[in-house]
Amino acid sequence: MNSLNFINPFGVSEDPGSYVGDFYTDNFAKGAGEGTLILNLGPQHPSTHGVLRVIVELEGEYVVRAEPVLGYLHRMHEKMAEVKTPWQYIPNMGRVDYLHPIAWNWAQVGACERLAGIEVPERAEYLRVVSCELNRISSHLMWWGAFVMDLGGVTPILYAFEEREKINDILQIVTGSRLTMSYFRFGGVSADVDDRFVRLTKEFVPYLRERLKMYKALVTDNVILRRRLEGVGPMDADLCRRHGATGPILRAAGLKRDTRTDAPYGVYHKFQYNVPTGPSDDCLGRYMLRLAEIEASLDIVEQAMGSLPPGPVRIDKAPKAGWKLPAGETYFAVEGARGQVGVHLVSDGGKNHYRVKLRAPGFSNLSLFAEAARGVLLADAIAILGSLDLVIPEVDR
């Protein structure tokens, strides 16, 4: 009897009587070839970086098909917007993407400000940029350590957390949090920076630049890592366009697309920084590009802190808790660590949002995996999955 008959959602059972039917596995198995194996990766597995399930069909150690399955972490963030006021909804954004919550914070607050015609003070705009870029760096560092750990290298993630803790020490001063941060408010930010914030931030920039040199010598130039990633999981510009990929994945494919420059918001237009592309569209290229983005973010932070203007950090007549959005519709997008974060907001003039649609970059980026993983070794499929930098609460929001 074909072993496919004995597969359940939790793995392969040796006992036909213990078979537990599963919609996804059963339907996926219908198209399986003779002699292939259906395997569940996740939903509880370290390589999936969250509650993600991937069903793969294997012929030996090669992937014939792969299909991501969502729904294990769905928390109805968009539906919650319909029963929450704009004020109440702000903390939700830190739960959508806990690695770059400030970008999501900006997208939601920015959409409300655009609809209401609120102008943000210049100092607040600078602080938004500084906090968002520091948060982007911490997100990329977390990805760097976890990605190398997926490949078998444990040491780098210890360094990544060391730098991440330094960033959290800085951001905690103004946000009061170290993970699900909520710093932006309608018309500005929740708090001004103090001398300690300024000092720690200015010290951190040259510190991390030196550390990046060590990362290069320890990890990036390691021949084992390069041979593990070179030529694995190419995702060219055509593949990215067809699936709506944005962020580092798209830029690694050679397309210079960045919301900060293509659709400028805040005061990003006042800074000189490089938007890196390439150097290749494989796993190594995506690795190299994210490290280059850390350097670009350091340049932005350094310029912003060096030219931080005086003034208020919030408008005088800032919206209060009972504030209602005017009736209308708007879309606001920012560049998150994983790509374009967008909030499509519809208001009927009531106290709650009428409808909110969140544009999560990880959802689009994950859709590339099925095509990119076809025909590769299972171990390489893990590398491809890791190179996407997925945050499952964002994908399965």
Image: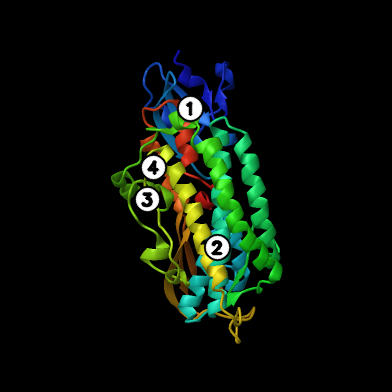
Residue 132 circle label: 2
Label 3, residues with CA under 10 Å away: few <14, some 14-19, many ≥20? many
User: Can residue 396 be seen in the rendering of this structure?
Assistant: yes
Q: Residue at x 46, y 77 (%)?
A: 115
Cα separation, mark 2 vs mark 4, equals 27 Å
Q: Which residue is mark 1?
A: 379
Cα separation, mark 3 vs mark 1, equals 26 Å
Mark nearest the camera among 3 and 2 is 3
Q: Amino acid at mark 1?
A: Ala
Q: Which residue is mark 3?
A: 277
In depth, the one of 192 and 27 nearer the eye is 192
Mark nearest the camera among 4 and 1 is 1
The x and y percentages for residue 231 are 37, 32
Q: Which residue is mark 4?
A: 368
Cα separation, mark 1 vs mark 2, equals 34 Å
In depth, the one of 346 and 373 nearer the eye is 373
- In terms of sequence position, does the residue under pointer 4 or pointer 1 come before the other? 4
Image position of 255 (left or right of 89): left
Cα separation, mark 3 vs mark 2, equals 21 Å
- In terms of sequence position, does the residue under pointer 3 or pointer 4 come before the other? 3
Which residue lies most toward the bottom here? 317
Mark nearest the camera among 3 and 1 is 3
**Do the CB atoms of the residues marked 3 and 4 lie less than 8 Å apart?**
no
Label 2, residues with CA under 10 Å away: few <14, some 14-19, many ≥20? many
Vertical placement of residue 61 versus 250, above or below: above
Vertical placement of residue 278 versus 200, above or below: above
